[in-house]
Amino acid sequence: MDLPLAHLDRPFDYLVPAELDAQALPGVRVKVRFAGQLVDGWLLERVAESDHPRPLYLEKVVSPVPVLAPEVARLARAVADRYAGSLADVLRLAVPPRHARVEKELTAAPEADAVPEADAVANGDADGTMRADGTTAGAADRPDGPDGIAGPSSPAGGPSGRAGGGGTPDAVDPRGWRDYPAGPALLRALTDGRSPRAVWSALPGEDWAARYADAVAAVVAGGRGALVVVADARDLERLDAALTDVLGTGRHVRLSAALGPARRYRAFLAARRGEVPVVIGTRAAMFAPVERLGLVAIWDDGDDLHAEPRAPYPHAREVLLTRAQLGEAAALVGGYARTAEAQLLVETRWAREVVADRATVRARMPAIAPTGDDPHLARDPGAASARLPSLAWTTARDALRADLPVLVQVPRRGYLPSIACADCRAPARCPHCAGPLALPAADGVPACRWCGRVAAAYACPECGGRRLRAAVTGARRTAEELGRAFPGVPVRTSGREEVLSAVPGGAGLVIATPGAEPVADGGYGAVLLLDSWSLLTRADLRAGEEALRRWLAAVALARPGGAGGRVVVVADGGLAPVQALLRWDAAWFAARELAERRELGFPPAVRMASVTGPADAVADLLAGVRLPDGAEILGPVPADEGRERMLVRVPRARAAALAGALHTAAGQRSARKAADPVRLQVDPLSLF
């Protein structure tokens, strides 16, 4: 039933009428009676008997197409248990909304699903739940898998050749994987039908989409399927082109909300019916059905777009790792940076790292220099506080003179996204809602970023001053300033309003916000990383990790140092994220970050859950929860809209017990129809 009530998170039995027997297959959408109402549900399985003395009858089969695959149903149950959620919420994320016209187009095609064995009783999903046959812990909690490339063998009856054929699988050319000592072995294991687990640190300038296409081709050559999840539409386009080049057309489908309801549902059904062996997509594709799944992969798992904003708030990385564990599939976690979560996989020996040797890294990376170290301060005393120190300016000038493009990364979009009083430096705030004022353009008037009201007659409440200055400079203002500094040079901006995919290789300035950096033909001659303080000083557990991730993504677009590639980061060279950038050593920083979090008791070294809501509701839930041994309650921490947040911390070994206890407590509140809602999040990205 599409009512995600925690106290109803269990299966219910319904009798199948004779007239619905042929259509009532496991995985179809159904209508059932529950509490006197006709509600939606899922038919999870057919059984011969029911323990219930008087089960009701199944009312209707909404569609005879079994869209919910059994393995996806098991995965959804495991994800719901891991995140203290209900199966109804997870299934809503896993299966896209029905599109009747698309189903009608496919009714002529033969169904590949088997007929049910018994026709007496249907185990209907009256509340979006199922029989408890899934595991309750995420993959990272069970480091009992293989150590390295030699993963477990494929299940009995595994592939012996290309899909649909026999013989020995064809070897896939390792191409760029030769730059990584363990790379060719990874492809061989995938082709042979084994299930290696790898954490891959990509080299500067690496065509990551081509490397993922090689890995997918190896799995397909072994007769299995693959699922790859990326963060956004730009990455999806790159991966789509790379897979088309390697596999040819018609061998994979894309799943993304940008496709629209009809195209997305058509692609989903093609995957469900086994018409293609490969599915790629953004976050929602983590639940996509894939025949004989042999590989799950995620690119740039530190991107916050991988975190689902809807209950129960699963992260794509954790869902894919759980899926690899349940289905004995290979797993590939890749990126230029490395998260603490990925480092934990390496340190627990659940996965093996795939990295290049230091000689190869040095040959591929550009020359990187900070502006805050002693030699540069001696030549330019203002470098520590200047927004564009002399080193950055000369680096950009030299690249432009060599007819090479220059990338400037600015952490903020807009013109002046934050302004202050020019006399007393007090932040300029809206007189109506106290939100921050911003200046949209050079000839614009201040406007509130929260309520949108214009503050044309703004006067500082502290000193009465009417002059304003920049507190934070955005991408458009930076483009304007650099355009004046380098007259005659074309200036392009890439950000929220317009994201560029590629730029030509000649002299030009590209001002981009993090994540919107376009690829330059032949690589950038110079990359300038400005306003590093705005990334490093955020009050966030992942501030350093996120800053390094964004820097590495930009620096990866530069030419190698031997070809003239130069990078300037406006930051103190002694900071740990800057040191990792200078050496291109994301693994070192991830190990350091994980060690610090282990010492301080923060995820992923421990499992932490947040309980957010009105103070009385939070207290009510925590009063009724039976926490496992070793649990600590931290807080309260102020949350948005006048609510508060309490944090519960347990060792990783007690993760399943914590999720179960919170889910039970939430069920008790929903059973007695508590008025104020409480949001439960396990391992949220933001704790404070």
Image: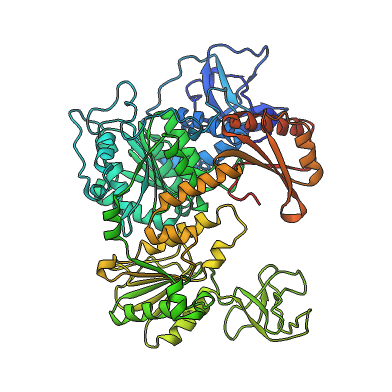
Q: Is residue 151 left or right of residue 232?
A: left
Q: Is residue 448 left or right of residue 616?
A: left
Q: Nearer the viewer, residue 287 or 117?
A: 287
Q: Is residue 561 left or right of residue 419?
A: left
The N terminus sits in image quarter: top right
In the rendered view, would you say 113 is above or below 451?
A: above
Q: Nearer the viewer, residue 532 or 482?
A: 532
Rendered location of residue 159, percent (x, y): 27, 28
Say how many tags the image has. Answer: 0
**Residue 250 in sight:** yes
What kind of colouring is applied to the model shown?
rainbow
**Residue 69 in sight:** no
Determine the image quadrant of residue 163: top left
In the rendered view, would you say 363 is above or below 140?
A: below
Q: Is residue 22 left or right of residue 461?
A: left
Q: What residue is at 33 percent from the left and 36 percent from the top?
A: 225
Determine the image quadrant of residue 145: top left
In the rendered view, would you say 463 is above or below 502?
A: below
Q: What residue is at 65 percent from the left and 36 percent from the top?
A: 4
Rendered location of residue 200, percent (x, y): 36, 46
Rendered location of residue 231, percent (x, y): 45, 52
Rendered location of residue 651, percent (x, y): 60, 34
